[in-house]
Amino acid sequence: MISSDIQKTIGSIYCVGRNYSDHAKELNNPVPKEPIIFTKSPACIVPFAGKIFLPDHLGRCDYETEIAVQLGSDLYQAEQNQVLEALRYVGIALDLTLRDKQNELKAKKYPWDLAKSFVNACPLSKFRQLASSQEIEELEIKLEVNGEVRQQGSTKQMLFSIPDLITFISQHIPLRSGDVILTGTPANVGPLKNNDYLVAFLNQEAIAEAEIVRI
Ligand code: ZN
């Protein structure tokens, strides 16, 4: 479960598209020259635990396993050292995405919100304090679905490092203490089916597990 303390303090959720080149390629997207930033509504947050209910009528719903960080102070037009100081908590998020809806919206050149902010679209693991500012460069994530490894990634494979991403966002958007940043998904995203059992690992430690219920 997310500690209620953290859930209460979550402000905005900022996400990054295509931050691993292998994922950009699998969806036939060009590798970006600067970070692609979008948001998810905090109303979509649900604990990454127990059962996660996803309405079946929404169509294909893909998992995207992502390192999530939470800020411990406000940042605006920040220098990298201020960003490193503000990085406080880390956990895992699923940036659930309605892929058919997203493709339809992309084709019309519309914003992606309807594909990213549906009910329960943002399962979050419990967060823990970052051990040190170096730790942010050495994080690994993994997702198992029904006991099979589906996604694996490391901060070393990112196109834009987490401090660079946050520095970039803060040049444009005033960030607040409590905001959460989802830092992009590695390759091998895929659709969720009823009864899929998900286990997410941060640095080899299983920190979240849940069953998908499509209703
Ligand atoms: Zn994502």
Image: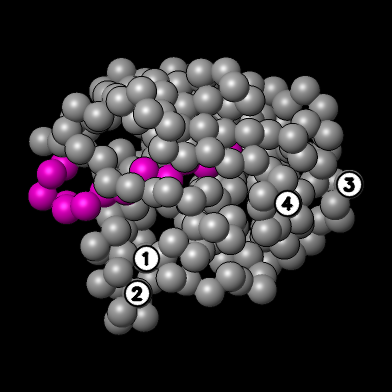
Q: Give the residue at x 31% y 79%.
A: 107
- CA separation, marks 1 and 2? 7 Å
Residue on which the image places disc 3: 81
Could you tell which of marks 3 and 1 lies nearer the N-terminus? Answer: 3
* Residue kind at label 1, given as amino acid type: Trp
Q: Which of the two residues, 42 or 138, is positioned nearer the viewer here?
A: 138
Kindly identify which numbered label has been placed on residue 161. Answer: 4
Q: Nearer the viewer, mark 4 or mark 3?
A: 4
Of mark 1 and mark 2, the one earlier in the sequence is 2
Residue range highlighted in magenta:
55-67
Q: Residue at x 33, y 47 (%)?
A: 190
- Mark 2: which amino acid? Lys
Instruction: Looking at the picture, tell me which residue is in the foreground, 75 or 142.
Output: 142
The local crowd at label 3, few if under 14, some if 14 to 19, many if 20 or more residues have their Cα within 10 Å, is few
Residue 9 appears in the picture as rendered: no
The span from disc 4 to disc 3 (Cα, nearest Å) is 14 Å
On residue 15, which mark appears? Answer: none
Contact check, label 1 and label 2, Cβ < 8 Å: yes
Q: Label 1: state its secondary structure.
A: loop
Tell me if label 4 and label 3 are in contact, CB under 8 Å.
Answer: no
Image coordinates of residue 88 in percent, x first then y, are: 72, 31
Quarter holding the C terminus is top left
Image height of 108 relative to 58, above or below = below
Q: Where is residue 2 in the image (x, y as percent from the top left)?
A: 48, 22
Find the distance from the CA under tag 1 to the CA under tag 4.
24 Å
Residue 50 position, x and y percent, is 31, 18
Tell me the tag on residue 106. Answer: 2
Mark 2 or mark 3: whose residue is earlier in sequence: 3
Q: Is residue 46 left or right of residue 178?
A: left
